[in-house]
């Protein structure tokens, strides 16, 4: 099969496109013919990293997390999926196991969802990491009807899903993005658009109930000033501040700082799929590449400032 993989642990040796042996599914595993994969920052961060640190690290290491495809062999111990079903999901990349950027993958049934009616492979592959992270971030922010919410970095993978989901919950959304993406952020449903430079942030005078920092790298002094007392700041990145410091901030100011990872629960997928069916959540996909051009797709995702999600098809 064709795949996109690292041949060495070194960070200077980026993934290459080439041939690898087809994987063989065990009796409790599913064999999936992959049709589409979306790129998340975790994928290019891993591609650019020295990957020897991963527990059970093995070479070659196929990169990629999200996928959508068709079941070619079904596991014996389950009745949920059969050969020919269209499925999507995410595999864990921080293991010795292969990622999703190959024509065939082997994974456990628990990593799969049926692709709902009317959803393309590309749309399905765009959802798991980014949409589930956006949903969990909004949950951590306690977003409900009337919440005054600031979404920072609102037209990227996580941000563009977060704006749409927050609107369905009745939040009043102020969203930041670069000038070039102003049209998109308003089309996604944001009530108000601001830039994300320090100067732009300084011009905001009314504080928010919550901030979902989809970009993830706001400085404490900036988000703290923009938060009401008892407000919540959530970032999808692991917080650098030690727990005792965030607890101290909470005790002294009432402001909660939290990290909001992707949460891969069935009820979260259900919510995302329901919103998609109701046409309240639509993935933005402006760049699609073939697997043979995966290196170019990675460059676009990392440096091309894409809107929404970058997709690779097989
Ligand atoms: N922990 C988890 O489970 C998890 C899951 C998903 C993502 N993440 C992390 O969350 C972050 C965002 O992921 P993503 O998929 O949304 O990435 P992305 O698609 O690359 O989007 C990043 C967004 O940040 C904006 N941005 C760039 N510079 C900015 C600045 N100075 N201030 C505010 N916004 C800025 C970009 O806007 P412009 O292009 O207009 O400049 C873009 O919309 C990444 O660091 C990723 O690793 C973590």
Image (cartoon, rainbow, N blue to C red):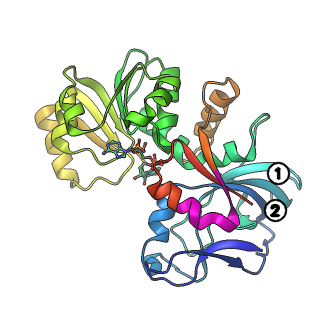
In this rendering, does residue 107 appear at all? yes
Question: Disc 1 and disc 2: Cα gap in Å?
Answer: 8 Å
In this rendering, does residue 254 appear at all? no
The residue at the far right in this view is 83
Residue 295, magenta (yes or no): yes
Which residue is under mark 2?
75
**Main secondary structure of the magenta stretch:** helix
Residue 190 placed where, x, y %? 44, 23
**Camera-side residue: 162 or 201?**
201
Residue 252 placed where, x, y %? 10, 36
The magenta-colored residue range is: 288-298
Which residue is under mark 1?
81
Q: Earlier in the sequence, mark 1 or mark 2?
A: 2
Residue 6 placed where, x, y %? 56, 78
Residue 52 placed where, x, y %? 45, 81
Q: Does 183 sit above or below residue 28? A: above
Tell me the quarter of the image containing the N terminus: bottom right
Which residue does the image show at 60% across and 43% down from the upper left? 286
């Amino acid at each position: 099969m064709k795949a996109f993989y690292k041949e060495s642990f070194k960070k200077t040796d980026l993934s290459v496109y080439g041939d690898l042996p087809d994987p063989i599914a065990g009796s409790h595993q599913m064999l999936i013919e992959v049709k589409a994969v979306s790129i998340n920052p975790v994928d290019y961060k891993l591609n650019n990293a020295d990957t020897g640190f991963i527990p059970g690290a093995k070479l070659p290491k196929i990169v990629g997390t999200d996928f959508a495809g068709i079941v070619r062999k079904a596991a014996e111990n389950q009745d949920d999926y059969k050969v020919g079903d269209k499925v999507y999901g995410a595999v864990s990349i921080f293991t010795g196991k292969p990622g999703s950027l190959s024509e065939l993958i082997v994974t456990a049934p628990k990593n799969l969802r049926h692709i709902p009616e009317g959803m393309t492979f590309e749309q399905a592959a765009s959802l798991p990491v980014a949409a589930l992270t956006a949903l969990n971030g909004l949950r951590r922010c306690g977003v409900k009807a009337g919440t005054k919410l600031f979404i920072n970095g609102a037209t990227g993978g996580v941000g563009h899903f977060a704006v749409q989901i927050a609107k369905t919950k009745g939040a009043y959304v102020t969203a930041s993005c670069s000038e070039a993406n102003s049209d998109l952020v308003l089309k996604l449903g944001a009530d108000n658009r601001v830039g994300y430079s320090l100067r732009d942030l300084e011009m905001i005078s009314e504080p928010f109930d919550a901030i979902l920092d989809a970009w993830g790298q706001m400085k404490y002094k900036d988000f703290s000033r923009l938060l009401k007392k008892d407000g919540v700041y959530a970032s999808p990145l692991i917080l650098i501040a030690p727990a005792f410091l965030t607890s101290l901030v909470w005790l002294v100011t009432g402001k909660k700082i939290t990290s909001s990872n992707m949460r891969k629960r069935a009820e979260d997928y259900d919510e995302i799929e329901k919103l998609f069916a109701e046409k309240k959540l639509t993935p933005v996909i402006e760049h699609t590449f073939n697997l043979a051009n995966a290196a170019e797709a990675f460059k676009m995702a990392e440096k091309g400032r894409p809107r929404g999600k970058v997709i690779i098809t097989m």
